[in-house]
Image: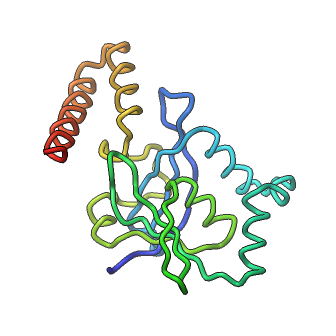
Amino acid sequence: MPRIQLFFRGVSEILGTDNLGLLILSDEEKERQISIVCDRAMAVQIELRMKKVPIAEIMLPEVLCKIIKMQDLQLELVIDDLVDGQYRTILYNAESIIPLLIRASDAVLLSIVGDIPLYIDYNLMKRQSVRYSISSRGVSLPVNTISDEMLQSALNKAIEDENYELASHLRDELKRRDKHNDKALD
């Protein structure tokens, strides 16, 4: 499968939410980017690493990555699909090729801490990415990368804020997913 290596570019917040963040990743040439939704706790963990806070050196991800290096394991992370609003990400040992599912935001943290390469399927990147702009004040986020729970929360907020155009769009996405899930059960 052709794939593209991703590089972490930054953490952003999702306006109107207190508990969600966005992880911005781009290709090596900084031409295209994808955004991965994460919880606030993960955004804070990544910010600790970006600010090189000394306590991070003895935190669990760093300790586990030191063990991985001592074992000389050749690991890689691959985002290969989008399932129910979540990027499906797999951790592989390059020698044994045994796949382990991992949350996409955790894969980004592991990639940063352990210097483990993170890839995305070429076709998925082509379908999900937007043009990368380092000076952008906002980030495009495909609605299909938002979990059902986050989508419902955004719908409730849009209704509360009387943003009926956005509410209609979010409702349509939820309905589309319900139809897709009903077909999958048949």
Relative horizontal placement of residue 9, taking residue 178 as reference (left or right): right
Q: Quadrant of the N terminus?
A: bottom left
Relative horizontal placement of residue 131, taking residue 74 as reference (left or right): left
Query: What sort of colour scheme is used for the picture?
Result: rainbow
Relative horizontal placement of residue 155, taking residue 133 as reference (left or right): left
Residue for point 68% across, 70% down: 114
Above or below — where is 11 with respect to 17?
below
Frontmost residue, 74 versus 121: 74
Relative horizontal placement of residue 41, taking residue 97 as reference (left or right): right
Q: Quadrant of residue 154?
A: top left
Residue for point 30% across, 19% down: 163
Q: Quadrant of residue 70?
A: bottom right
User: Where does residue 100 sit, x and y in percent of width and height?
Assistant: 51, 66
Above or below — where is 136 with respect to 116?
above
Q: Quadrant of residue 181?
A: top left
Residue for point 44% across, 43% down: 138
Q: Quadrant of the C terminus?
A: top left
Picture mark count: 0
User: Where does residue 64 sit, x and y in percent of width and height?
Assistant: 74, 65
Frontmost residue, 119 versus 70: 70
User: Where does residue 21 sit, x and y in percent of width and height?
Assistant: 54, 41
User: Where does residue 52 sit, x and y in percent of width and height?
Assistant: 79, 57
Residue for point 27% across, 27% down: 166
